[in-house]
Structures are given as structure tokens and as C-alpha cells.
Amino acid sequence: MRVLVAANLTPFLKGGADDHIQNLSQALIQAGHQVETLRLPFAFNPAADIERAMQAARALDLQAPSGQSIDRLISLQFPAYGVQHPHHVAWLMHQHRAVYELFDSAKTPKAEQALRPAIHQFDAEVLGPISHQGRLFANSKRVAERLQQFNQLNAKPIYHPPPDHQRFYADKAEDYIFFPSRFESLKRQSLVIEAAHAMASPLTIVLAGEGGQLEAAKEQIARLGLGEKVKLLGRISAEEKIVWYSRALAVCFPPFDEDLGYVTLEAMLSAKPVITCVDSGGPCEFVTHNETGLVVEPNPKALADAIDQLYQQRSLAIEMGQAGLAQWKSLNVSWSSVVDQLLVA
């Protein structure tokens, strides 16, 4: 079967989405299909560029470009899911969040506010028929909930393994909490740094990654005098990340309304408990309070108390980590299952 995977490309902005796109394409190839990946250029601003991107996506009819027939189109992102094809399956990472759950009339630029109705209409016209045909999927329950909440569309969640999922393992826990993620406001590294200032235990908070909020994090650490309690690794390799996971006492991942969150899944594969927040979205689909981790209020004191609890009760941390690994295994998540579900639809 000839399969086209449609997604976006935002130059020099790398993250979990890139791994998702590449791993889906690889899984399709391993299943014996011919695969091409179409990545449409996308910019978050100005608003006029977003409008042009929507128009460009809808103008693409890819049933048989240049006479080459395509059997299936699998789209993953806004506005790439606007591409036209009679056998179109959408597996959403998320929509354009700035006009949905992240919309704030006091902070969203006026031009983007003016474009909001057009994006809502675009999603209704494009995703509505796909949903009615039973071809609309989401990469988590949280993403599916948003589709129902804002668009009244039904989507079936399909989980997938994180990158390098076979390579994660557990080693003897050392005295640190690990938090690898892109430094952005929604990931809330600043909240964890505040928690480090409030916690009583001698644990070190280890933050890995780069991003737009990295310099702000450095300034916050210096201002609070946390040079000995918070360690910034910067960009690390996949191999290094796996080792840091394996030796952590626990993993802290408290983002705001995350779509899915590879960090949670990687922690479970490493048999580490996860500390997350009640409003963290995707992680809460996997972290059960006092069973596979701790789910707390999104404030420094609550996070600090959770960290201190796991330091004081190391045996509990180990039990929670093992429970998380067992839970992940019980889900039977695999790329072969993902491919089967998408192509059957």
C-alpha cells in the first residue's frame, strides 16, 4: 500500500512531534508499505501566515499527484489535516492550541483572536467528515477530550511507544529527581525550581533540555541561590537521557495540560515514579496517585512535599516505579498495533 504521512515543519524547532512523525513512517515501512512524508512549512505567527497555511493545505488534492496513486493519507497536525484525499485518516497530536484550551482574550494577539473563528470553521469542515466516517483518532485521551469539548467531534485515542522504548531500564536510584524537557512556559520548569527552593530533602533537581525559557531558568536559579540544588544539563544525547532516567529516584513532570508527554512514558519504562500535577493533562492518564506516582496541586509547596515524601520513603518510590512499569506493559502498546488501527480505518 502507498501511504502518505502529512505533518508540519517548523524549521529548527525540534521536539517530540518530530520523533512521532519519523517513528510512524518507519513503522509503516516495517509493515511493508511504501511511505512518503509530506511536511508543510508552518509558522505560529504572524496570523496571516497561519491563514495562508490553512488555504495551502486545503488546496492540495493528493489522491493521485502526477498520476501516482496514493492509497492512504494519514495526517497528524494542524493545518496538514486539511489536505484532501478520499481515504484520509487523521491521528491528531493536537489542534492549534492557541485558539482552543490556551486561548486567553487578555493575552492572545488581536490578529490571532480575529482568526480564531476561521480556524474553528476549518477544523469543523475538515475534521467533521473524517470523524463521522470513523477515521478520526487522537494520540491521547486528553486530545480526544478537547475535540469533544470544543468541536463536538468523537476521536478514538491510540497510544504509541516513545522513541527508543526498548532501551529504557532501571538502575539503583541515586539522590536526584530528573526532569528532561524543552524549556518552555507550558512545561513549567520554573515551578520545579521554586519547589527546589521549598523542599527540605537534600536531593538534587536535574533539568535537561534547551528552549526559549532556558535563560530565564538560569536567572531564577541564581536569584534563589540554588546552584547546588538544581543542575542544568542542557542538551543531552538519547543515550545520556536513558542513563539519567535509570538512576533517578523519581521523575518530575508537571506541565500544563500536556497532550501526551513522552517523559511520563519514559519514566514508566525506567520503573520510576512520576510526580505530576492535577492540571497536567496527558500524564494524568498514566499516573495514579499513590500507585504509580504522585499527582499534586500545581504549586511549589505541593511539589516540594511530594519530592520530600519520596526521599523519606524510598521503598515506596521503588514500589511505585515498578507499578508504573507493570501498568505500561499491561497496555500492550506497540507500533504494529498503531499501524493496524490506522490502516483499517
Image (tube, rainbow, N blue to C red):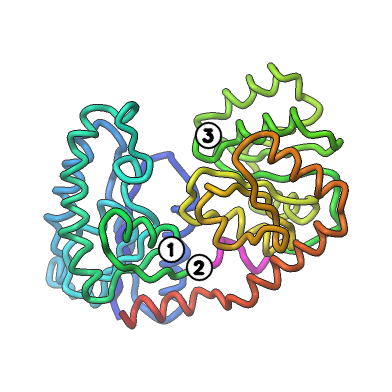
Looking at the image, is mark 1 or mark 2 earlier in the sequence? 1
Looking at the image, is mark 3 or mark 1 earlier in the sequence? 1
Residues under numbered marks 1 and 2 in contact, where contact means CB atoms less than 8 Å apart = yes
Q: SS of the residue at dot 3?
A: loop
- Residue 50, above or below 243: above
Q: Residues within 10 Å of mark 2 (few under 14, many from 20)?
A: many
Q: Position of residue 236 (x, y in %)?
A: 65, 43
- Residue 75, above or below 294: below
Q: Which residue is mark 2?
A: 160
Measured Cα–Cα span from mark 2 to mark 3: 25 Å
For badge 3, the amino acid type reads: Gly
Q: SS of the residue at dot 1?
A: loop
Q: For the residues carrying marks 3 and 1, which lies nearer the camera in this image?
A: 1
Q: Which residue is mark 1?
A: 139
For the point 65% across and 69% down, the residue is: 166
Measured Cα–Cα span from mark 3 to mark 1: 24 Å
For badge 2, the amino acid type reads: His
Q: Main secondary structure of the magenta part?
A: loop
Q: Position of residue 338 (x, y in %)?
A: 44, 75
- Residue 327, above or below 150: below
Looking at the image, is mark 2 or mark 3 earlier in the sequence? 2
Magenta residues (range): 159-168
Q: Which residue is mark 3?
A: 211
Q: Nearer the viewer, residue 74 or 117?
A: 117
Q: Position of residue 164 (x, y in %)?
A: 61, 63
